[in-house]
Amino acid sequence: MDRAQDESPSPRLYRKVAARLMDEIRAGRHPVGARMPAERDLSLTMGVSRPVVREALLALEVMGVVEVRIGSGAYVLRLPEDEPRSPAEVTPMELVQARLIFEGEAASLAAANITDEELARLDSAVAAMRREDGSFEDWQAGLTDFHMTMAHATRNLAVERSVRDLWDMRSRSTECRRMLEEARSRNYRYSLQQHVEILAALKARDPARARAAVRMHLEGSIEHVLMAIEERAVADARARVAEMRSRYFSR
């Protein structure tokens, strides 16, 4: 498959891969309890990039179909439902507000419990985000890996699942996806630096610093959402005025 096609910013590509994997699990190619093929192998057989495979596996994990074990791989937990329920579409503001409640405290817990192996994985996630020539899918996969690893490092299953649920809603919301693409194009370096600072706090194993770094990051996200709402309102007002001019002054 052509690389440009593979790395297009379509939010539906990883969903197609997830659906195909669910079909294979139902067909018995990957039995319950078995380890899924490695990301590299799935990437080759499905003709997509590894970041897309990673997002597909994350979607299956959120649905409880597989469990991704750091350093080991993905394991099938159960057969998928024939009609998996999609979470309600949330607004970007609702999502960021909820993340502000959960992820700051998650970072604090992670700083106290994180392992060297998990810190290395966060380094790799930041490296993926740092690639200026990477696609939006590359950025998204690195970002997701960063926050899911941090959630796992809390050693609190309830917190980890809460964060994963929020990220599942984030990935499925069309409006959130559109704003994320806008945010990356406008604030690439600023967002990257914020994640570097979060990582530094986690490496220092400083709970208060980690909490503050995540809250600063998400408060910046709230400001971006407010700016986007304002810009959209201005654009809508201009469109209405242009329509009125056309109606009253057309010949």
Image: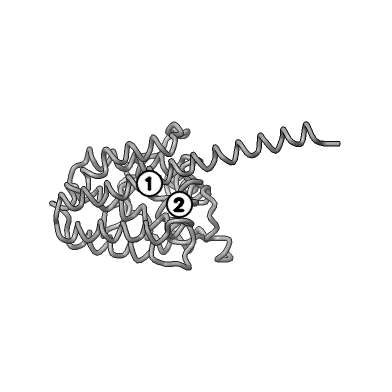
Q: Quadrant of residue 188?
A: bottom left
Q: Residue at x 39, y 50 (%)?
A: 57
Q: Residue at x 37, y 60 (%)?
A: 38
The amino acid on which the numbered mark 2 sits, given as a three-letter code, is Ala
Judging by the rendered image, the residue that carries numbered circle 2 is: 183
Q: Secondary structure at mark 2?
A: helix
Judging by the rendered image, the residue that carries numbered circle 1 is: 221
Residue 15 is left or right of residue 207, and the answer is right
Q: Secondary structure at mark 1?
A: helix
Residue 35 is left or right of residue 50, and the answer is left
Q: Quadrant of the C terminus?
A: top right
Q: Is residue 129 visible?
A: yes
Badge 2 or badge 1: first in the primary sequence: 2
Cα–Cα gap, marks 2 and 1: 8 Å
Image colouring: one colour
Q: Residue at x 49, y 40 (%)?
A: 230
In the image, which disc is placed on residue 115? Answer: none
Q: Is residue 26 visible?
A: no
Callout 1 environment at 10 Å: few (<14), some (14 to 19), or many (20+)? many
The amino acid on which the numbered mark 1 sits, given as a three-letter code, is Ser
